[in-house]
Image (cartoon, rainbow, N blue to C red):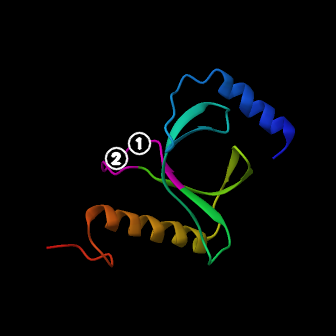
C-alpha cells in the first residue's frame, strides 16, 4: 500500500463519525464513499496461503438473507486492503468457512441439521 493511499485513508477517517467495535471496520467503495462493515470471519487458508475476511454491511437480499462478502486481505499494520476473490477455488474456501461458522452458531456439527 502506497503512502498516498495511507494518507487518503487517514484523511477520510479523521472525520469518522462512527464508534467502532473490534468486529467492525470502515470501508470505502470505488466512489470513495464510506461504509461500516461487520466482520463475520477472518482466517488464513493453508490451502491457498492467503488471508481472508468474510463480512457484511447488515443489508439483506430480496429473500431476507443477510448479504455476506468475502475478500483477500493484504496490507500492513493498521491498514488493510481488501482484494477481490477471482477464482472458484477461493470462493469455495470462503463458502466452506462460512458454512462451518453457521453450523457452529446453530449448534450443529458436520453440517447436518438437527431434527
Question: Is 59 situated above or below 43?
Answer: above
Which residue does the image show at 55% across and 34% down from the upper left? 35
Callout 1: 10 Å neighbours few (<14), some, many (20+)? few
Residue with the mark numbered 2: 62
Which residue does the image show at 67% across and 32% down from the upper left? 32
| Residue 96: % across, % down | 46, 71
67 vs 91, left or right, is: left
Q: Quadrant of residue 27?
A: top right
What SS does tag 2 mark? Answer: loop
Which residue does the image show at 78% across and 37% down from the upper left? 6
Q: In the rendered picture of this protein, how many numbered marks are placed on residues?
A: 2
Residue with the mark numbered 1: 58
Q: CA distance from mark 2 to mark 1?
A: 13 Å
Queried whether the magenta region covers residue 65, the answer comes back as yes
| Residue 103: % across, % down | 32, 68
Question: Is 97 situated above or below 33?
Answer: below
80 vs 114, left or right, is: right
Label 2 or label 1, whichever lies nearer to me, is 1
Q: Quadrant of residue 31?
A: top right
Q: Quadrant of the C terminus?
A: bottom left
| Residue 1: % across, % down | 81, 47
| Residue 101: % across, % down | 39, 64
Residue range in magenta is 54-66
Question: Is 61 situated above or below 26?
Answer: below
What SS does tag 1 mark? Answer: loop
Determine which of the numbered discs, if any, sits on residue 77 in the image: none
Q: Magenta region, mostly helix, strand or loop?
A: loop
Which residue does the image show at 34% across and 47% down from the upper left? 62
Decide which of 16, 94 is in the foreground and name it: 16
Amino acid at each position: 500500500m502506497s503512502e498516498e493511499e495511507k494518507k487518503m485513508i487517514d484523511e477520510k477517517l479523521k472525520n469518522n463519525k462512527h464508534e467502532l467495535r473490534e468486529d467492525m471496520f470502515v470501508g470505502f467503495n470505488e466512489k470513495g464513499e464510506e461504509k461500516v462493515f461487520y466482520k463475520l470471519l477472518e482466517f488464513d487458508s493453508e490451502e491457498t496461503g492467503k488471508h481472508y475476511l468474510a463480512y457484511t454491511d447488515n443489508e439483506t437480499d430480496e429473500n431476507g438473507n443477510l448479504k455476506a462478502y468475502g475478500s483477500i486481505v493484504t496490507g500492513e499494520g493498521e491498514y488493510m486492503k481488501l482484494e477481490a476473490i477471482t477464482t472458484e477455488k477461493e470462493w469455495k474456501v470462503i463458502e466452506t468457512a462460512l458454512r462451518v461458522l453457521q453450523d457452529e452458531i446453530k449448534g450443529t456439527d458436520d453440517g447436518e441439521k438437527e431434527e
